[in-house]
Amino acid sequence: MALSVHSPYDMRKLFIIVIILLNQNQQVSCGSIFEVIFDKLIGIKHSIVTTIEMVRKNIQTAFVRTFSLNPPAEKPRRLRDVSSSFIQPARLFEKMSKYETPDLKNVFCGAAHSYTTPQLSASDGRIMETHVAYTLDGYILTLHRLHSSQTHSKREKRTILLHHGLLGSSADWILLGPKKSLPYILSDAGHDVWLANSRGNYYSRTHVSMKCNSEKYWNFSWQEIGEYDLPATLDYIRKTKNSTEPIDYIGHSMGATALLVLLSEKRNYNSYLRIAILLAPLARMTNTGGSLHMLATMEKTELVRILGTREFMPSRRTSPLLSMKICHRFDEFCNNPLFFLSGTPLQNGIRSIQFKNKLQEYVPAGGSTKTVQHYLELINNREFHHYGKPDRKFELKFINTPILLISSNDDSISNVTDNRILYLSLANPVGHIIIEGKNLSHSELAWGSNADILFYYKIKDMIDVGLNINEIF
């Protein structure tokens, strides 16, 4: 009995024939019939899989731009023209055609923001370049450079490097928008403004050989950021500009820590800088309070169990166990790993819903657990020292770069008393400005709603006229 099945309708006819034959007690070879049925089911399965794969590719083509390791043949659109919110992590490394595209390893590692820093800047009506620098230990760093909208032909512009704080990124500096953000203020004054990104954040999450989901990749603290990332960044800027003119440096929180490491360990880099302005620096942490102090009191084994040994809270949500221990009442910011560490924004009540949403989207931007653990060591050992080596201190007395400190008495992490001790430890301090009674928490020295009036424009004036701060602050 020959059977041929070509469609679902033929399948129904086949089952009817089998039932009729069985009812008439005819001899039917079920084996051959089942083989036909089985072959047909396999064909249907392959058809379904093929259809799903085709749909998937069509969706990917429609919504996700493919990242090519080869530079584009034609000039790309300006970043301000990019409107898609379907951003892959690889999009973080898009470059203008005149810059080299690196051989990135595992670029699809970690989440991405809805908009990159250059795209966020474009929404503010600015143009920002993306550059790439390589560290001696193989990490690939992304730098962002603002195009000045002003022409200042009567005087030479300064080159200024801004470095973000703990778990931050270059986006932190421009969250206040086009009128109030420090990079825009400096750029509008005619200065050449660069924004750094440390290893481990969303913009610097690649390596020449290691994948970022490996334990070895995350084996760094702010010490390596100071010893490797900052030298690579400064060298790249000088090489790109073909200039040995000293650079002005502005570092917030960990950005200040990393610079102190660099200038004390690799002292020749003191000659690379004209001045360093450190906002809420973290170095002496004897009087640090809040969550960091509480974490410092925990046993190391318990910390490892809760925090792990790789990326710090990669889910971008604070562990419920830690939240219950430290947050005595419900607070939306306590669930954010950065604010969990640095404290709830004190100016929260006067912020718009739009700004709060932007803040929660871009913060934190990633970092290693070891970076946090290194700060906990400073709290416990009451010294500014190498990771795991309390007796090996960073010798601040060898730093001869002029340094200005800016602190807030509302900052529970970068304590004013500790910063006074830091000021006295430096060989060439310019001054220590203490902002009192303005509700500026640790992070708000980078994006406080009135930071522009309190000290951003004063920083610009000081860079413009020189190092005499008495007439400015």
Image (cartoon, rainbow, N blue to C red):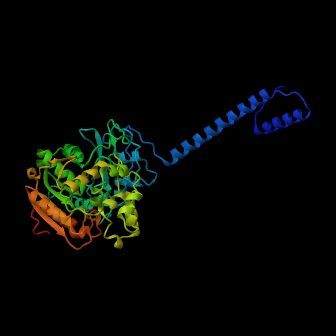
Viewport quadrant of the C terminus: bottom left
**Residue closest to the eye, 425 or 121:** 425
Q: Residue at x 15, y 55 (%)?
A: 156
Which quadrant of the view contains residue 347? bottom left
The x and y percentages for residue 440 are: 26, 68
Give above or below for 360 relative to 303.
below
Q: Is residue 28 left or right of residue 415?
A: right
Q: Is residue 259 left or right of residue 19?
A: left
Residue 193 visible: no
Residue 417 visible: yes
In the image as oriented, which residue stretches furthest toward the right? 24
The x and y percentages for residue 292 are: 28, 59
Viewport quadrant of the N terminus: top right
The x and y percentages for residue 351 are: 36, 70
Q: Residue at x 9, y 64 (%)?
A: 468
Which quadrant of the view contains residue 37? top right
**Residue closest to the eye, 284 or 251:** 284
**Residue closest to the eye, 117 or 172:** 172
